Amino acid sequence: MMLVDKMQDHPAEEARRRAPMVDRDAGLGWPEGGPHDAVVVAAASPTVPALVRQLADRGRVIIPGGTRHGAQQLVRIRRAGPSLIEEDLGPVAFVPLVGGQGW
């Protein structure tokens, strides 16, 4: 059973409706649910994934990036109109992102 399925009957169901959990290739985001105000990616990516294009104006994504088994940095990316602004939040260690936008 997937974590997403287990959440259906959890007491925090109301919170889940406001911040849904989606079971899919994380690097591709969730275009039909966008534009997004905030996204948290919990696996390291070698590049900035396509999901940043789904951010609302002033939306942000927090994502670990870097090498698969080496140095990684936590990055906040904010949309400011057509521009994306990256901010390094410091060193981290996350599992690698798998799928179309990962390793």
Image (tube, rainbow, N blue to C red):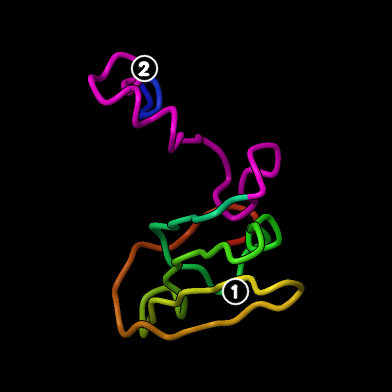
Of circles 1 and 2, the one toward us is 2
Whole-number angstrom distance, CA of label 1 to CA of label 2: 32 Å
Q: Quadrant of the C terminus?
A: bottom right
Span colored in magenta: 6-35
The residue under the point 54% across, 82% down is: 86
Q: Secondary structure at mark 1?
A: loop
State yes or no: discs 1 and 2 in contact (Cβ < 8 Å).
no
Mark 1 nearby-residue class (10 Å; few <14, some 14–19, many ≥20): some
The residue that mark 1 highlights is: 47
Residue 31 part of the magenta segment: yes
Task: Kindly indicate the quadrant of the structure image that contains residue 6.
Answer: top left
The residue under the point 58% across, 45% down is: 25
Residue type at mark 1: give it. Thr
The residue that mark 2 highlights is: 8
Vertical position of residue 28 compared to residue 81: above or below: above
Mark 2 nearby-residue class (10 Å; few <14, some 14–19, many ≥20): few
Q: Quadrant of the N terminus?
A: top left
Residue 27 part of the magenta segment: yes
Q: Residue 60: x, y in percent? A: 52, 65
* Front residue of 81 and 5: 81
